[in-house]
Structures are given as C-alpha cells and as structure tokens.
Image: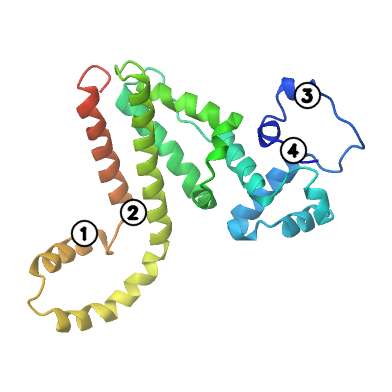
Amino acid sequence: MAKNLVDLLWRDDPAAAAGGRRGPRARRSTAEVVSRAIELADHGGLDTVTIRALAQSLELPPMSIYTHVNSRADLLVLMLDEMHSRMGVRPVEGTGWAARVRAVAEDNLDMLRGHPWVLDIGDQRAALGPGTIAKYDRELHAFDDTGLADVERDAALSFLLDFVRAAAMRMRESAEKEQFGAFWAEAGPRLATYLGDSFPLAQSVGQAAGEALGAPYDAAVAWEFGLTRAIDGLRAIIGAGPGS
C-alpha cells in the first residue's frame, strides 16, 4: 500500500504513533533506512543512492525498502528533511538582526559544504517535513524586531538562502582550483600571446585579482563579499537601528 509522504515525514510524531501498526515488525526502521541513505550520499554523492545500493548496504532485499518509502524521490525528500533537522545552529541570543542573519547564512553554508549532495535535491515537498518546518520557523526569527511584514520576512529569508545556495554551488565547483594553479603556470603566458592589447580592463583586473587571490576565483573572498552585500541590501529595506 502506498504511503502518504506527509505521514512518512511525520512518522515520529505522537499523532502518527497513535494510529498503531499492523503486520510483522520490520528488520530496519525507516529512520535507519534514511540515515544509511545519507551515509551513502555523504560518501559517494547522490547518484550512489539507489534503492538497490541502499538495500545491499542494509543487507535487505530491494523490495523491502519499499516497505519504508514509496520511491527514490520520496526517499530524497526524507533525507533532505532529516538533514534540516540535524543542522548545527550558532547561538544568536542577544544579538541584532544582522548578526542573526549572518548566523543563518553560515549555518546553511556549513550544512551544504558538509553534505554537498543536498544541493542536488530541489524537491519542494520537503517543505512539509518537521525538520524543514522547524528550520524555517527558527530562521524566520532572524528578522524579529525588523518591522518586516510576514510576506516580506519570507521573501527576505528566501533571498538570503538563495544567495547561500548559489555560493555553495560555486564553492563546490571551485574545489578543483588547486589543479588550476599548475595549469595556469603553463597556460597564462601562452594566453598572453593571443590577447596582446585586447581587453585591457579584463587583463588588468584579472591580473590584480589573481595575484591577490592566488587563483582566478577565491570562494572565501567571494562569500564574505557577497554575504556583506546581501546584508547591506536587507538593511536598505529594514533600515538602520539598534539591531543592525
């Protein structure tokens, strides 16, 4: 029998437990199945998380996984919601809104860098899960005492998280920058023979940035610059005050 995804997400809620269960007890719990799927993703990326691979890892027949989840797509939703429930949270009591917003951004970046496969899940159904709802509620409080209306508060949080997600994706892509350094030592002079006096601004800025960063792109510098500008942008609609 197909399981309702909302019921799966809220399987540990007292309201779900009140319904009781029928049939023999499963060898593995749904929580174990989800946790093992997360382990697989952490080790080899999201492509390694298949029903067959998960079953083999748990020493179960593949069809037994479907006693816990309806499909791989539903499994990914459960994994994402679980990651949201596990997120580390920086203490922000007694701080202003700008510091709280920065903490939210840094908490999310930590999660995405520690578990980059999360970037590959875009299923909005995760918004119905307990971990995701708790995360959403907690992060909305970053904008307490800012005067933002409800819709503005939601939009401000979405703006911030979109920036974090984009930055995390760029950081994942730039993980190979150490390899680029060796490549550039050989390719740079060769490229210069083609450019000559063309694109002088690109060459001067690129050279200055490259010398300062030691690479064509520095994720840490881009992150700090972007986050500061994002907070400045929010300040424009929130205004300066004690919490800024």
Q: Mark 1 to mark 4: distance in Å?
A: 55 Å
The structure's colour scheme is rainbow
**Structural crowding at the residue carrying mark 1, measured as other residues with C-alpha within 10 Å and reported as few (<14), some (14–19) or many (≥20):** few
Image quarter hosting the N terminus: top right
Q: Which residue is mark 3?
A: 17
Q: Are marks 3 and 4 in contact (CB under 8 Å)?
A: no
User: Is label 3 or label 4 in front?
Assistant: 4
Q: Secondary structure at mark 4?
A: loop
Q: Amino acid at mark 4?
A: Lys
* Quadrant hosting residue 143: top left
Q: Position of residue 122 (x, y in %)?
A: 51, 47
Compare marks 2 and 3 and give the one earlier in the sequence. 3
Q: Nearer the viewer, residue 48 or 66?
A: 66
Cα–Cα gap, marks 1 and 2: 13 Å
How far, Cα to Cα, is label 3 from label 1? 58 Å
The amino acid pointed to by label 2 is Ala
Checking the image for residue 219, the label placed there is 2
Callout 4 environment at 10 Å: few (<14), some (14 to 19), or many (20+)? Answer: some
Q: What is the residue that sits farthest to the front in this orientation?
A: 1
Q: Which residue is mark 4?
A: 3
In the rendered structure, are the residues bearing label 2 and label 3 in contact, judged by CB atoms less than 8 Å apart? no
Residue at the image position 64 percent from the left and 41 percent from the top: 78
Question: Dots 1 and 4: beta carbons under 8 Å?
Answer: no
Q: Secondary structure at mark 1?
A: helix
Q: Earlier in the sequence, mark 1 or mark 4?
A: 4
Q: Which residue bears the numbered disc 1?
A: 212
Q: Secondary structure at mark 2?
A: helix
Q: Residue at x 22, y 64 (%)?
A: 210
Q: Indicate the amino acid at tag 1.
A: Ala
- How far across and how far down the image is residue 34, in percent? 69, 44
